[in-house]
Structure formats: structure tokens, C-alpha cells
Amino acid sequence: MSASREDGRVSASLEDGRVSGLLDRPRAGGPAPATPLLAVEDLAAWYGHSHILQGLSLEVRPDEIVTLVGRNGAGKTTTLKTIMGLVAKRAGRVTFAGADILHRPPHERFHRGLAYVPEERRIVPGLTVEENLRLGILAARGARATRRDEARRIEAIAETFPRLKQRLKQEAITMSGGEQQMLAIARALMAEPVMVLLDEPSEGIMPILVEEMFEQFVAMKRAGTTILLVEQNVELALDVSDRVYIVDGGSVVYHAPAAELRADPEIQARYCAV
Amino acid sequence: MSDLTIGGFPLDLLGLQLVTGVALGAIYVLVGIGLSLIFGLMNVVNFAHGAFFMVGAYVGVFLYGYTGSFWLSLVAAPLAMGLLGLAVERVLVRPLYGRGIDDPLLLTFGLSYVMVEGVRIAFGLTGLPFGAPPELRGAVDIGIGYFPLYRLFLIAFSMAVVGALWLFIERTAFGLVIRAGARDPQIVQVLGIEISKVWLAIFGLGCALAGLAGILAAPLQGVTPEMGIPVLAEAFVVTVVGGMGSLAGAVLAGLIVGIVVAMTSLVAPDMTKMAIFALMALVLLVRPRGLLGRAGALG
């Protein structure tokens, strides 16, 4: 996979990344350090009285795949939910494409190009596969997409996800878990987002489908979609990722290029065991 | 005409009573669908639904007195109730979201009293008589006897409205959002849809349907400030029997309730209320989610 080739560039730019806010150079300027597409600073989130996220910070730069790993309950899913605006009590700063979005409603994130595939997939029962896909682009109508784009996108997505192609008219909830996961990802891609947050996409899915899915992530990255991934399957995640953050106790305890963590089984064992 | 009888009633009479029940059911369907849509999507039990029905009837009757056009009333009553519904959702109901099911329920309960009192102050305590418009008066032979033309119109018109509503929900983009939003409002938001706008529209639509049912019912009984109270109870029976949030369920249950009321009033006129609640109890015993609950939500 192409990840290792990318690592050199990414680790070299890691230092620059810290000051990139000052430089603010456009991406087209070459392989120079890029302004983070998503910057999370000092993020805090609560469920009732439970203080789940306690000052979590991370950055994702354009065209990267960044993975959050960590034990169950470390706060990975909550991080994605908070970035998406789905946790009611939240504080800190989330900047996406230059705008502070932390306290904006979830639908605004969609319109800025941020997509989210939740852990539970959230395929809408009662709707067909095609209707679930249409739901992914409806809101973009008029702004980012026309009615004609809708059919074109469904066709393109069906080509990318051949498993969905034969099932367009089937009630989505009757498909296998893996197929539903493909649909959840496809639905998130319908409106051609700039960045996708993916929560545990491999959970409960046949290994052969998992590999197919991760190949899809690399293809998405190549097509210019930035990815923030939460994944328990650390080995697979490291294969496709540029950088990794380890989350523990609601904040980041370690971050490095994926290659570096791959070469450090001790760190892996300490933080990534389930 | 046949001489067959069932339980002492000629078959023709039973047939006519059945059609009467369908006409009555058509009203229940329209009121029930609105109630069901609002509950299914927003989890709001609209206790003011009967009051919207009543005010819709008054608006229609008032306008008819001014313009002499029943058709204009038929458009204006739902339109006015739709607009009032939009205002009520935006100003009164919206601040209560996220506070459980009780607060909007109590609010709309109180609102229904305000609306009833408002109408009493404006139009008097006794109500207004109202008959079918001249073009819809009279009776037609439907094979088993003569049946009031207005009731036939009521059945046909309501079914046309339900058909249009079904097309709207099944075939349009907004309908897709409605169906998805009823199941998973959060994912709908994540996919870029401003759910509060959807809720606003649904509340308006539900109230418009109540207003339409009100003006359609007016020629059957005239209008009184209290006309919405029994209708609200019947509409609740319809949504519970049909299954909360199910459009097809509301249609099926509305017709069943209408027929049960009509048939009971033939045998034991004092027991119609009891009959529909007995029906509800029976359905709840056999199918706690209602006839088409969840399995066919908004389908």
C-alpha cells in the first residue's frame, strides 16, 4: 500500500504543521506543509455528569488518513461525535476548513463538506438501498448538486461499491452487516465530502469485506478525500494511515507517523490492547 | 331491493350505514393522519389537534358566509390552520424540544382551551348552523338506496387528499426526508438536513389536515366551539389502532373506526363511544403497536 511512501513527507512536515496556521499557504503550492483541514484543540465533552473528553487535541491535514486508536472507552467515538456536533455538552475548539464549527448544528458541517459514518451505521429502516443513498445527497441539491447529479452519483457509487449495485431496490436493513457498512460509507460519499469521519468501520464484518473496505479508503484518499478513522483493527489501520493518535482517558497520549507506531510493538501493546 | 336481513336489519340499510361509516371514517382519517405524522416525526402529542379542526371549520364557515364559495373555504380553512400551525410550532412548541414528551403535550392541551375560548368569544357559545353547499345537496342512488351526495363527495375528496399525501411522502424528496426523519432524526441531520425546518413543515401540514377535516365535517353537523373535543378522542383511537406514526395505519384505522361508529349507532346509539374504545382495547391486546405500527411506519 502507498502509506509507507507517504510517511516520509508526512513526518517531515509534522514540525511545520505546528506553525502552519501562520503560513496559511494554499495546498496547490506543492508538497509544502498544509494547513490542517481539521484542527481540534482542547476538546472537552460530557455525557450527563461523565466527563468523557478532557482536553483532546489533534489535527488532520488535507488528503491524509489519520487514525485514532485506543482502548474501549478511551473516548474515540465521543471525539468523532463531538466533532460532528452530536454531543450536547461540549467545549474547546473545532476548526474545519478555516471555520470554527464546534457550536454549529450538525447539518452545517455537512454543507461545509464534513461527512460522518457512525459506528452503528444508522441505515434507515424502511428505506431501500437507493433511498438511503439519495438521502445522502438530497441536502446538497441546489447548492452542491442538481437533481441530475443525484442519478449520476448513485450510478458512480454503485460502480465503486458493486455489492450495492444489485441491491439498489432492496430494503437496506435486510442486507448483511458488511453490506450495510458499505452503504453507510457510500451514503456519506454521495455528496462528495472533503473529509469523512469513520467510526469502527470493520466492526462485526467478515474479514474479506474488511480488506475490501480498507482498499476503498486508500482509493478515497487518492481521490482527494481526507479521512479520520477510529479503528480497533490497529494493524490494518496502520497499513493505510499516514499518522496515528493514541487516545487514552479522554485525551491524546501519543501521536506519530503510522510507520513509527508500527515499528513500536511496546507502545502498541500498552495502549491498543482492547 | 332485497328482502335479506341480518339481525333484523335489511341488508340495504346495513349497506347504506356502511357507506355512512366510510364517510365518517374519512374525517377520522384526515384528523388521524395529521396527529400521527406529528407524533411519528416529532414525538409531540398534539392535544390541540381537535381545536385546529374546530377553528378550521369556523374559518371555512365564516368565509363561506362572506364569499358564498364552499370551494374557497375548502382551500382557505386548511391554509389558515397550516399557517397557524407553523406559528404555534415556531413560537410555542420549539422551545420545548428535548424536554420529553410531557411539556409539548401540556402546552398543546392548554392551547386547545385558549382556542376554544377564543372562538366562544368571537362567535358565541351556541355555534353556527351550516349545510352542504347547494351544488352538493341532494342524494344519489348508489344501487342499494339513496345516499347523500355530500357524503359521497366527502369520501372521494378525502381519498384524493390521502392519495396525494401518499404520493408526496413516497415519491418526493421531502417525503423521503419525512420517512427517514421519523426513524432516525440524527442521521438526517448528519446528512445535511435542518431537521427543525422539517418539523416545522410537518406541524403545519398536520394542522392544515385538521383544518381541512374541520370544514369538510361542518356540513354534517354544523359548527360549535366544542366540535373538536370528541374528534380529538376519536383521532387518538385512530392513531393507536392504526399504529403511531403509520400513515397507512391511520387510513385503515380511520375507516374501521368510522364503520364501527356507524354500525353501533344503528344498533345501540348510546354505545358508540364505548364501541370505539372497546375496539382500541381489543387491538391493543392483540397488537400492542397497533395494526400497522412500526412495521409500516409512514409507509
Image: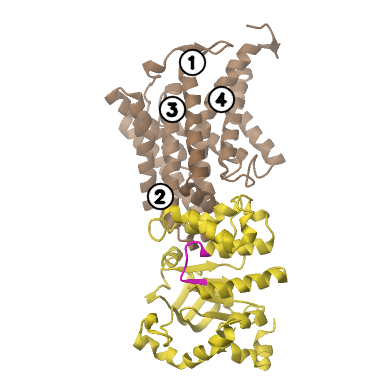
Residue shown at the point (59%, 11%) measured from the top left: B144
Where's residue B175, x and y in %? 49, 47
Residue mark closest to the camera, 2 vs 1: 1
Q: Who is closer to the viewer here, A217 or A235? A: A217
- Circles 2 and 1, Cβ within 8 Å, touching? The answer is no
- Crowding around mark 4 (Cα neighbors within 10 Å: few <14, some 14 to 19, many 20+) is many
Q: Is residue B144 above or below residue B226?
A: above
Where's residue A172, x and y in %? 63, 54
Report whether mark 2 lies on the same chain as mark 3: yes
In three-dimensional space, the C-alpha distance between marks 4 and 1, rounded to whole angstroms, equals 13 Å
In three-dimensional space, the C-alpha distance between marks 4 and 3, rounded to whole angstroms, equals 14 Å
Q: Which mark is residue B89?
A: 2
Q: Which residues are magenta?
A: A189-196
Report whether mark 4 lies on the same chain as mark 1: yes
Q: Earlier in the sequence, mark 4 or mark 1?
A: 4
* Residue A47 visible in rendering: no
Q: Quadrant of residue B280?
A: top right
Shown colour of chain B: brown
